[in-house]
Amino acid sequence: MTGGPLVVLVGPMGSGKSTVGGVLARRLGVPYRDTDADIVAAQGREISDIFVDEGEPYFRELERAAVAAAVAEHTGVLALGGGAVLDGGTRALLAGLPVAYLSMDVEEAVRRVGLGAARPLLAVNPRRQWRELMEARRHLYTEVARVVVATDDRTPEEVAQAVLDALELKDV
């Protein structure tokens, strides 16, 4: 494949996309990019503040543009925000790309994300809300993914190796 990301990571918040993405980028000898970090840098404020101040639809527009730019420009490891797959245009952009869905169960999510974390979509009842988010998104993650890698009870290095193996990529 010429151009485009070498690996795209999708999955719910707390699945390890940022951490695993950094490990993969180092192992592959390529740059790492996170669309949530792109949005924060461009807006000069945290995502939770964007949700509170402008609402989710506004954030999703920013996210759609950030993903389109990253897919067009980035040739390393790319991590997308947990809700990026909600947009049909984004899912179409991911078609044919080496996408890995990092999955995990609810108990692992609660352990990683924590009940008091600043996650705007988990503000009230984190367990129930996480389950509801996953019911709405799981099929979308699966739709865009070439491979699914479970992250439960695995270190970031183990998850990175599983992604490399599943996508048949060699580290440097």
Image: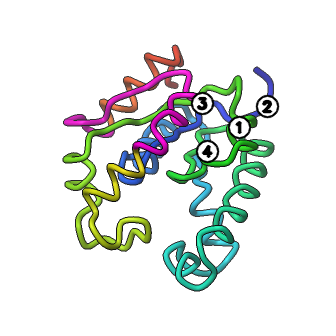
Give me the C-alpha separation between circle 3 and circle 2.
18 Å
Which numbered disc, 2 or 1, marks the residue that appears first in the sequence?
2
Residue to which mark 2 is pinned: 3
Mark number for residue 131? none
Q: Quadrant of residue 125?
A: bottom left
Mark 2: which amino acid? Gly
Query: Does residue 168 sit above or below 133 in this rendering?
Result: above
Give me the C-alpha separation between circle 2 and circle 1.
6 Å
Quarter of the image with the N terminus in it:
top right
- Disc 4 or disc 3, which is closer to the eye? 3
Neighbour tally class for label 1: few under 14, some 14-19, many 20 plus, Cα within 10 Å: some
Mark 1: which amino acid? Thr
Q: Secondary structure at mark 1?
A: loop
Task: State which region is magenta.
Answer: 135-156
Which residue lies at the image location 55% right of the left edge and 36% below the top edge? 140
Residue to which mark 3 is pinned: 144
Mark 3: which amino acid? Val
Give me the C-alpha separation between circle 1 and circle 3.
18 Å
Neighbour tally class for label 2: few under 14, some 14-19, many 20 plus, Cα within 10 Å: few
Viewer-nearest residue: 4 or 10: 10
Mark number for residue 31? 4
Q: Secondary structure at mark 3?
A: helix
Viewer-nearest residue: 82 or 40: 82
* Circles 3 and 2 in contact, beta carbons < 8 Å: no
Q: Quadrant of residue 7?
A: top right
Residue 97: give x, y in percent of width and height. Answer: 67, 27
Residue to which mark 1 is pinned: 75
Q: Quadrant of residue 153?
A: top left
Mark 4: which amino acid? Pro
Q: Secondary structure at mark 2?
A: loop
* Circles 1 and 4 in contact, beta carbons < 8 Å: yes
